[in-house]
Amino acid sequence: MKNRMTLFVTLFLTLQSSLILLAPSAYAEIEQTYFCDDKLGDTPIRQGGRVKPLYVHAVDMMKYLTGKKGYENLSAVQTYCLLSLKGMSLKSDIKLAARVDHVEAQEYFDLPEGQKTILFDDLIERIRDLQIETRRIKEETAYKKAMTKLLNQTGLYQEIIQGNNWLLPAVTGNRTDWIPITSFLREDKILEAKANQAQSPFQKVIFDEVERFDKITDAPYHLEYKYAKARLPIIAMMITFLALITLTIFKKFTATLILAGITIALQLALITIRVLISGRAPITNMYETVMFSGFGALFLSMLIGHFKKEKAFIYVGLMFNACTLMMMNFATGMLSDAISPLVPVLRDNFWLSTHVTTIILSYGALALSWIMANTVLIKSSFGKLTKADEVYYSDLIYTILKYGTIMLGAGIILGGVWADYSWGRFWGWDPKKTWSLIAFVIYMAILHGRYTNWIPNSRFIPLVAGAFMSIMMAWFGVNYILASGLHSYGFSEGGAIFLGSFFLAQTLIIIITTLKSNLSKTVVQAHE
């Protein structure tokens, strides 16, 4: 037994030596990687209540722990693998550090001025003190949230370095057990693979078991791996910007329509793949609502633009779609693209696919009116816009408002019916519902005022621009600022600064353009 254990341990050293001979210039990197490489990215892991590819899980873990996708020159998969192998007493030079952004937390850990990170290994040594400090803070302050997050991150890091986070399938007949990597890589399996002259016996053991697992399951983790690697959101964003450029440069917008059609096709593929992976409508978290609203707004704008023969609709559709795609690609601290299991109340796909879809489509439609209203405000104040142009664009905005407001009202009613079905009451003044109703009332008042000529165009346009702040409050504010109510499954961390910046920017645009417009009228009257 002692000789077998010696052989098992020295097997790693043999693997290292052979790789070093093949690539001596990369000695420093290979010394730390063992059998950990990106080939493992397409292997299944069970975490978060579902089966997914290791690549997706590793990226999520690294982003949660450090805000980055890897460690120095290592990929997320390599980093996660090497950390997990610490549970098998294999050494690694990886030293992950957690971000400490809160000032009080920096003072608690006595960090040097300017330093905003602390090693997880140091946090493990102080985890008892961290637990006491977190419990000591009674109120739900920003400091407590920061300390709680550090505590959760430290616990997750411990689980990873102990090898208990990486769960691999162990197939027996038609049954699959998910066991930690430390138990999965048994000595007898490795020695058998070595006896069969496998170049990488550790990978062979893993891949052979994955092959057996694939024969008895239909888990779409291979599809999810390809989806994650394809990076469709960044491609769609680039094509959207290209469509906006062609719309600006060329008088004929055939090229713009083609590019917009390609963007819609890409986003439809993105949505369809997420549906196939998750088995539900892709509208259950903030990332998915942003994704679906951009797609829906662009599709709706092209549809209305086709019937109205007006390319201004294409412009606003592309603009809003570009905004949503930028958020999906760059606002990763605010929007998480992770696919998670649904809470029980959301597992009724009929209501999920009707109520939430209708609400999100209404947000997209009303966003079109918001972009067009702001465009008219800026153009009338800093460019040339005749009275006839103002009337024309007001009519276009009015057209979009009708679609958006009708869908918002329908979505609220469907939500009430779903609430009665799920919770036994049609209305409960939940913050999400309440703010949706507030937004609906605001838009109904604007529509009524415009229809009865109570609101002239000079007031109608800035009112439409400002009204979208109520949508942003219902959409983002309830999640990022209020963070309470029955819609808790949609809550997210961060985003308050984004929302505050949006409100400030929109308010300044309305004030500046209104003052400039009034000043221009005064100058004209004085000249006359």
Image (spheres, rainbow, N blue to C red):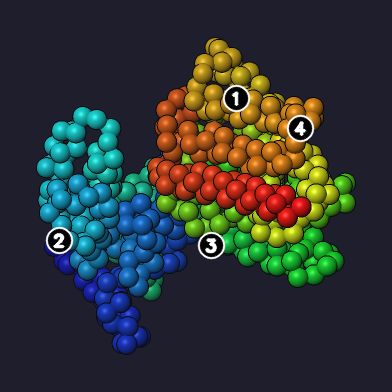
Whole-number angstrom distance, CA of label 1 to CA of label 3: 40 Å
What secondary structure is marked by label 4? helix
Q: Are marks 4 and 2 in contact (CB under 8 Å)?
A: no
- Tag 2 or tag 3, which sits nearer the N-term? 2
Mark 2 secondary-structure assignment:
loop
The residue singled out by tag 2 in the image is 112
Which residue corresponds to mark 3?
Answer: 229
Q: Position of residue 139 (x, y in %)?
A: 24, 30
Q: How many marks?
A: 4
Instruction: For mark 1, give the secondary structure.
Output: helix
Q: Amino acid at mark 1?
A: Leu
Three-letter code, disc 4? Arg
Q: Is residue 152 left or right of residue 522?
A: left
**Residue 88 visible in rendering:** no
Give the residue displayed 20% in from the left and 48% down from the top. Answer: 105
The reply to whether callout 3 and callout 2 are in contact (CB within 8 Å) is no
